[in-house]
Amino acid sequence: MCTFWVSPVDLVPYVIDLVPASVEQLSGGQAIFQKLADHVNHLKPLHVKGFINGKLVNNMLVDNRAMVNLIPYSIYKKLGGSDKKLIKTKRTINGVKGKLILAKGFSLMKLTIRSKTLAIVFVVAKVQGSYSLILGCEWIHGNQCVPSSLH
């Protein structure tokens, strides 16, 4: 929330006040936003659970910085994926600290989160991480989502 200044033709400013109680107003259209007491809880990553090809998958990270949907090869195999079903590729992806990782291939999988089921293309690669898989911009935009861990 912020304060908007509206200037009509005669250049007389009108203030539309949309500032919450946690903001102190200053002169000149400036504002100081105060930190919430529990601000650390709002910095947690957004993760969801759902089903891939009918099998429960917990701890899926929604990351609007990831350009692709990424699934580790080990999780792909646990979900019943096989090397024969992979669409082979020689593409690489940037890993942590810019390290290039060769993708094993692409896989089309059915992802269900709550009541919505979509066919999703995942990049399959030999990676390890704290999450089961990463849902990137492709999934976010395809679902017309605005991810937020602020709730």
Image (cartoon, grey):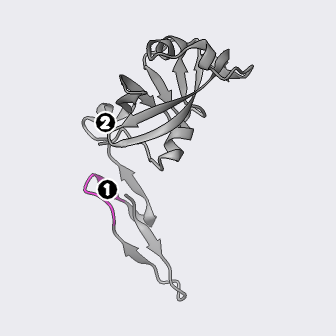
- Badge 1: few (under 14), some or many (20 or more) residues near its Cα, within 10 Å? few
* 86 drawn magenta: no
Report the span colored magenta.
18-25
Q: The C terminus lies in which quarter of the figure?
A: top left
Residue toward you, 148 or 26: 148
- Majority secondary structure of magenta residues: loop
Give the CA separation, mark 2 to mark 1: 18 Å
Q: Which residue is mark 1?
A: 24
Q: Is residue 44 visible?
A: no
Label 2, secondary structure: give it.
helix
Point 44% across, 12% down: residue: 78
Left or right for 84, reference 63: right
Give the residue type at disc 1.
Glu
Q: Residue furthest bottom?
A: 10
Label 1, secondary structure: give it.
strand
Image coordinates of residue 37 in percent, x first then y, are: 24, 37
Left or right for 14, reference 92: left
Point 60% across, 34% down: residue: 67
Image coordinates of residue 28 in percent, x first then y, are: 45, 65
Q: Earlier in the sequence, mark 2 or mark 1?
A: 1
Q: Which residue is mark 2?
A: 39
Q: Residue furthest front?
A: 84
Residue toward you, 37 or 122: 122
Q: The N terminus lies in which quarter of the figure?
A: bottom left
Give the residue type at disc 2.
His
Left or right for 89, reference 69: right
Residue toward you, 71 or 62: 71
Image coordinates of residue 100 in percent, x first then y, are: 69, 16
